[in-house]
Amino acid sequence: MAQDFINEVTKALKQKQYEKLRRIIQIPQSPEIAELLESLDIKDSLQLFRNINPKISSDIFSHLTLSKQIMFLDYLNEKEKKILISFLSPDDRAFLLDRLPQDLKDSLFLLMNKETLDLTKNLLNYPKDTVGRIMTTNFVAIKSNWTVKNSMKYLREKADVSDSIDIVYVIDDKGKLIDDIPLTRLILSDDSSTINDIMDNYFISVSANDNIEKAVEIIKKQDINLIPVVDSEGILVGMLTVDDLLDIEEQEATEDFFKIGAIEVTKKNKNDLTLNIKEASIGLLYKSRVSWLSSLVIVGVISGISVAIFESTIAETLALIFFLPLTIDSGGNAGSQSATLMVRALATGVVKLSDWANLLIKELIVSLALGLTLGAVVSIIGLLKGGLIIAFIIGLAMVLIVIVGSTIGMCLPFVLTKLGADPATSSGPLITSVADIFGILIYFSVATLVLGL
């Protein structure tokens, strides 16, 4: 069905049937039209965009990649940009402006009327990663002394203003949130009843200054699609929808994956990398990767120095070199596993900083079991390759290396979280490199002690 629709739109565009385009393109089809615009050249995409109802085109615009949005803003004239900005929902408008270059952002500010400008700047003034930064102010609220009939009439009149009326918010004369009512309850209630008669005085809200992660936890726990947002005095200032949170979570998840792969995500390159890696420049990709790789080279030098310290041990028993990569890699792999589990658990809120001690004990037990298992396997290989002494050395070293690697992998995310850093930074190459250093020291220390060198 989607492909048939796209074919119909493409055909109408080629035949310049612009009235047909305006008639067949509706808001629910925005993602498909946005995808089509991404695939068209600038001439055709502008032609299509300009021949869509402004309310619908603004919704389509919010689904475009940042690079495509900037391209459109470069080609649209001042009047078109003014209309576009005015039709964007407050949260989409703030989200867009937050990512634009400063000069383009300033030029768009000049196109806004005072009310829109004040509203937009108010959202942008909330700290990053807070609910207020991504909430929408397009909501409708009713009063408790209104009748159901008057309330329904008001909702029908204001339906286009609100991003959702599935839940109807009830406020007092000062604008303070006092309840939220499902629309179905209103529909099923007697017209003459007052809102106060059908209220249950139970609602869940978040503060505009709350961290976004807190809002995510509440929405997941309560299994709801939107939640009201209040200020410090309980005044209803907006609402948060699931689609807003999904956009943020996708971007955060992408950032975490980059950090796990030791790719630097800075404020400057964040939008280009996380939102459209396909169109990121070669220079940007180079800069985002070179810093961490250079740092890890230094860590690798430390590993080399660690090996050099035990030259006499290596010269005495060359068979040890054969098992060095095997044992060292196992420590890094075990550490990466532990770090991945902890980073995810901390991110989802399943684990708190206070759980550190209990998890450390559990990790020590698990890593001991893993180490003994892997140690038994490599000991058999060592026995065949170098005899009983070599088997004992690599078996014992494997147990210790896996325990140490796992412990480092488990502890580092907690340490970084305690210091206020992103625990995702501890995964992947960093854990492996740190575990390598400790693995080399453990491996050759065990060999030196057992061989009496």
Image: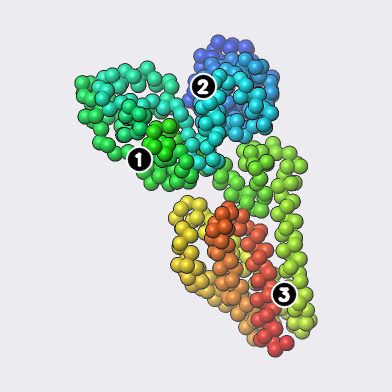
> Which residue is pictured at 55% across the width and 10% down the height?
19
Element type where label 3 sits in the image: helix
If you read the primary sequence from the N terminus, does the residue marked by circle 2 or circle 3 appear first? 2
The mark found on residue 97 in the picture is none
Q: Residues within 10 Å of mark 1 (few under 14, many from 20)?
A: few
If you read the primary sequence from the N terminus, does the residue marked by circle 1 or circle 3 appear first? 1
> Which kind of residue does numbered mark 3 sit on?
Phe
Which residue of the protein is positioned furthest toward the bottom in this rendering?
A: 452
Element type where label 1 sits in the image: loop
Q: Position of residue 91 (x, y in %)?
A: 51, 31
> Which kind of residue does numbered mark 1 sit on?
Ile
- The colour scheme used here is rainbow
Nearest the eye: 238 or 432: 238
The mark found on residue 204 in the picture is 1
If you read the primary sequence from the N terminus, does the residue marked by circle 2 or circle 1 appear first? 2
Q: Residues within 10 Å of mark 3 (few under 14, many from 20)?
A: few
Front label number (2 vs 3): 2
Q: Position of residue 360 (x, y in %)?
A: 50, 68
> Which kind of residue does numbered mark 2 sit on?
Glu
Q: Determine the CA span between mark 2 and mark 1.
A: 29 Å
> Which residue is pictured at 73% across the width and 87% down the height?
453
The mark found on residue 322 in the picture is 3
Front label number (1 vs 3): 1
The mark found on residue 115 in the picture is 2
Q: Residues within 10 Å of mark 2 (few under 14, many from 20)?
A: few
> Which residue is pictured at 62% across the width and 77% down the height?
397
Residue 381 falls in image quadrant: bottom right
Q: Is residue 427 above or below residue 76?
A: below
> Which residue is pictured at 64% across the width and 32% down the height?
100
Q: Are marks 2 and 3 in contact (CB under 8 Å)?
A: no
Q: Tell me if 177 is positioned left or right of 422 in this view.
A: left
